Image (cartoon, grey):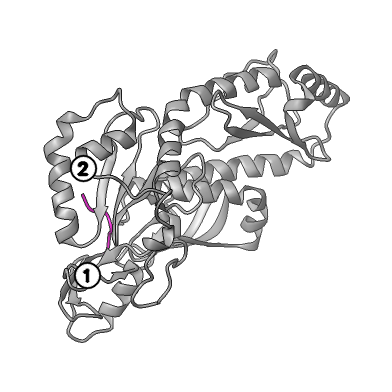
């Protein structure tokens, strides 16, 4: 992951600490204040496994937003996008921290209570003791439960509350001073219905296949790594706006296993039918039946890494397999990268390292990025 001009524009005080782009340190700026931060990426550069270190002051400010930032790490495609999200959340957090010290006029409380009564207390999941944070619950047309968190400032209802949702797309609220919470709630319901097909497609995959990653997907997660066979899987990234279109796909496994699947996908792309479910399209294009949850257990696919002897490493499952058909041993990419770097016989060219399989000693090639077509 290079230090791009886009990252320089967003965070001019955040600098790379190594030539591999796995460590960044510096400052993130919000409301004219600089906060020290350090971002450590794994060798495969996956944001979802990144570690964020920061000053105690920044940690205290973002304490109530940790789950939001965790979701953003899983959903953002690159570091630049995540830093944009981080700065947005930090701006909201700073604003709300400042608002806590601003006395609310009596009209604020009477207006908020009136709006909650109009909305209906049965739709309220939580109200904090200071009446500054409200969580509302809703059920979409398919019975899925959702929450929206509202952070109200002292100028409510002249200014709209900040809205936090578990969506794969931004949620922008249309607001005028005469609006109330029920207007936000109705916009929230409309947004839920606009994402219905996206969640339907992923719910079918979650219910009918073995999803290896993410282990506990949030509603904002757009990717699924689906087991195809022993040490063979496909990672799909679904467009929330067009969930019935062909998703971005890349395969993980030994070349002799995944090359025929790549060929089938490329040859059959023209057969994709937007009127058919995403899962059924994948079955027909690849000419396979995904392992059924009713017949097999997840342990049949959850093979431990051959180096650390664990399945999960900082949340990630093994994602690299020896290409030799007689071996097929899976490894975490981070484990394999460190192993190969420690061997005197290994050699590296840019982001590719060449070495031997720890199990069968056959030639093995590893790229620093796991993404494959």
Task: Determine the main secondary structure of the stretch shown in magenta.
Answer: loop
- Residue 148 higher or lower than 98, as above or below: above
Residue identifier under label 2: 286
Query: Can you say which quadrant of the picture contains the N terminus?
Result: bottom left
Residue 232 forms part of the magenta stretch: no
The location of residue 270, given as percent across then percent down, is: 15, 30
Q: Which mark is residue 309?
A: none
Outermost residue on the top side: it is: 178
| Disc 1 secondary structure class | loop
Q: What residue is drawn where x is 38% and y is 67%?
A: 17
The location of residue 184, given as percent across then percent down, is: 63, 22
Relative depth, front residue between 128 and 305: 305
Q: Is 27 displayed left or right of 238 in the figure?
A: right
Residue 210, visible in the rendered structure: yes
Q: Which mark is residue 322?
A: 1
- Residue 348 higher or lower than 73, as above or below: below
């Amino acid at each position: 992951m290079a230090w791009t001009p886009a990252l320089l524009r967003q965070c001019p005080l955040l600098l790379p600490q190594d030539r591999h782009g796995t460590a960044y340190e510096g400052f993130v700026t919000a409301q004219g204040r600089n906060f020290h931060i350090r971002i450590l990426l794994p060798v495969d550069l996956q944001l979802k496994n990144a570690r964020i270190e920061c000053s105690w002051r920044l940690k205290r400010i973002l304490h109530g937003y940790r789950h939001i930032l965790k979701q953003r790490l899983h959903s953002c495609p690159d570091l630049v996008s995540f830093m944009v999200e981080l700065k947005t959340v930090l701006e909201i957090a700073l604003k709300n921290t400042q608002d806590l010290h601003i006395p609310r006029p009596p009209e604020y409380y009477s207006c908020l209570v009136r709006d909650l009564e109009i909305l209906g207390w049965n739709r309220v999941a939580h109200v904090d003791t200071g009446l500054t944070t409200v969580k509302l619950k809703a059920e979409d047309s398919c019975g899925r439960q959702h929450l929206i968190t509202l952070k109200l400032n002292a100028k409510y209802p002249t200014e709209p509350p900040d809205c936090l949702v578990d969506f794969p797309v931004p949620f922008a609220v249309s607001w005028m001073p005469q609006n109330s919470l029920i207007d936000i709630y109705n916009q929230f319901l409309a947004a839920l219905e606009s994402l219905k097909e996206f969640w339907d497609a992923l719910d079918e995959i979650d219910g009918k296949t073995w999803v290896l990653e993410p282990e506990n997907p949030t509603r904002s997660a757009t990717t699924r790594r689906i087991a195809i066979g022993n040490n063979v899987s496909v990672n799909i990234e679904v467009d929330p706006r067009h969930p019935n279109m062909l998703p971005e796909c890349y395969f993980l496994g030994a070349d002799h296993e995944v090359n025929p699947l790549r060929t089938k996908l490329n040859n059959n792309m023209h057969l994709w039918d937007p009127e058919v479910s995403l899962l059924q399209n994948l079955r027909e294009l690849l000419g396979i039946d995904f392992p059924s949850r009713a017949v097999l257990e997840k342990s049949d696919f959850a093979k431990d890494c051959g180096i650390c002897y664990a399945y999960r490493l900082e949340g990630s499952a093994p994602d690299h397999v020896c290409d030799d058909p007689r071996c097929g041993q899976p490894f975490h990419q981070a484990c394999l990268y460190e192993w190969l770097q420690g061997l005197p016989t290994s050699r590296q060219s840019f982001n590719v390292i060449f070495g031997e399989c720890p199990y069968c000693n056959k030639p093995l090639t590893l790229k620093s990025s796991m993404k494959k077509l």
